[in-house]
Amino acid sequence: QVQLAESGGGLVQTGGSLNVTCIFSGRTFNDYDLAWFRQAPGKEREFVAAIRRSSTFTTYADSVKGRFVISRDNAKNTVYLQMNHLKPDDTAVYYCAADRVGSPNYYLSSTYDYWGQGTQVTVSS
């Protein structure tokens, strides 16, 4: 059974940076595509970024493009989300998710079978 554990969230001022981390366990990390989603209070969960198992393909939501970077270290079974130039609108619980099938619908939460518990990111104005 796949388990995902996020960490690295916290409180940061507008314009600051955070690097959130997700550690994967239970199966072969290289067999999974990974993604980050976020959910703000009163809003639906939304796609943030995704990275294919080969690391050759990454993609981002328009709202974070140019500010966030997703990466993975297959030797450490870890996926990262480096968040720069943070804004109050980035405040949310950030979740990592894993997909074994390799669906092209990487932006849909229904694509992912496994989810972490989330880490809170709060950006103060």
Image: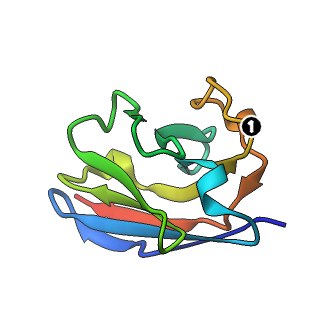
Classify 94 as above or below 67.
Answer: below
Left or right for 86, reference 44: left
Residue located farthest toward the right when viewing the structure as drawn = 1
Q: Amino acid at mark 1?
A: Val
Q: Is residue 120 visible?
A: yes
Left or right for 104, reference 84: right
Q: Which residue is mark 1?
A: 101
Left or right for 98, reference 113: left
Residue located farthest toward the top when viewing the structure as drawn = 104
Q: Is residue 97 visible?
A: no
Q: How many labels were placed on the picture?
A: 1
Residue 14: horizontal and vertical position, in percent?
19, 58
Residue 43: horizontal and vertical position, in percent?
59, 40
Residue lying at 58% horizontally and 56% vertically, measured from the top left: 96
Residue 117: horizontal and vertical position, in percent?
67, 67
User: Looking at this view, is 123 or 58 the one in front?
Assistant: 58
Q: Quadrant of the C terminus?
A: bottom left
Picture quadrant of residue 6: bottom right
Picture quadrant of residue 25: bottom right
User: Looking at this view, is 52 or 42 the one in front?
Assistant: 52
- Number of residues whose C-alpha sits closer than 10 Å to that of mark 1, classed few (under 14), some (14–19) or many (20 or more): few
Element class at badge 1: loop
Residue lying at 37% horizontally and 54% vertically, measured from the top left: 71
User: Looking at this view, is 95 or 77 the one in front?
Assistant: 77
Residue 50: horizontal and vertical position, in percent?
48, 41
Residue lying at 33% horizontally and 32% vertically, measured from the top left: 63
Colouring of the image: rainbow
User: Looking at this view, is 68 or 85 the one in front?
Assistant: 68
Residue lying at 29% horizontally and 47% vertically, measured from the top left: 68
Left or right for 38, reference 83: right
Q: Quadrant of the N terminus?
A: bottom right
